[in-house]
Image (cartoon, rainbow, N blue to C red):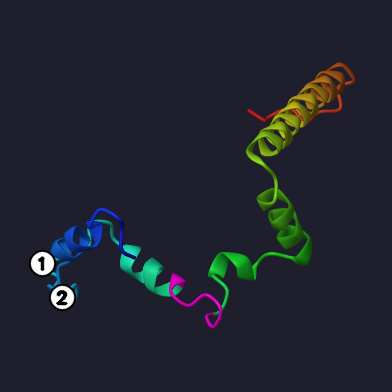
């Protein structure tokens, strides 16, 4: 795409036709172990089999992942806050039940 001020010549002068061979581990050592395998597995995701972690997911789990993936950042944060509040309420309820069990003497005591 030519620019009105001759920028095409400038861009052409910046082009490099040097070939860099990334196959050499001496020139291009792998900085993070496992990255090359991960990148290779991501090159053609359509033809490859699903990752191991997805094999154990049920259809409900996949639907939840799709739902969470479609949320905006604000909606995702709201969902996380709701889960934190739910976990807190569950902790309070569990604490009340444990206290109630101690009072009713129905909890098993550790043997000495």
Visible in this render: residue 7? yes
Q: Main secondary structure of the magenta part?
A: loop
User: In the rendered view, would you say 73 is above or below 26?
Assistant: above
Q: In this view, does 63 lie above or below 37?
A: above
Residue identified by numbered label 2? 21
SS at circle 1 = loop
51 displayed left or right of 112: left
Where does the image place residue 26, in percent across and percent down from the top left? 9, 68
Q: How crowded is mark 1: few (under 14 residues within 10 Å), some or many (20 or more)?
A: few
Q: Which mark is residue 83?
A: none
Q: Residue placed farthest to the left in the image?
A: 26
Residue bounds of the magenta highlight: 42-48
Mark 1 in CB contact with mark 2 (< 8 angstroms): yes
Residue to which mark 1 is pinned? 27
Residue 76, image quadrant:
top right
Residue mark closest to the camera, 1 vs 2: 2
Can you give x and y, in whole percent of width and height, for residue 49 in the image?
A: 56, 79
For the point 15% across and 75% down, which residue is it?
Answer: 21
Residue toward you, 44 or 106: 44
Identity of the residue furthest to the bottom in this view: 47
């Amino acid at each position: 795409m030519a620019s009105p001020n001759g920028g095409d010549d400038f861009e052409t002068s910046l082009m490099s036709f040097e070939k860099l061979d990334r196959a050499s581990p001496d020139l291009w050592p792998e900085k993070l172990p496992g990255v090359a395998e991960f990148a290779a597995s991501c090159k053609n995701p359509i033809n490859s089999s699903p990752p191991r972690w997805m094999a154990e997911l049920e259809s409900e789990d996949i639907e939840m992942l799709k739902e969470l993936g479609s949320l905006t950042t604000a909606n995702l944060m709201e969902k996380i806050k709701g889960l934190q509040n739910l976990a807190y309420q569950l902790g309070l309820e569990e604490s009340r039940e444990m206290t109630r069990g101690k009072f009713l003497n129905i909890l098993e005591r550790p043997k000495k």
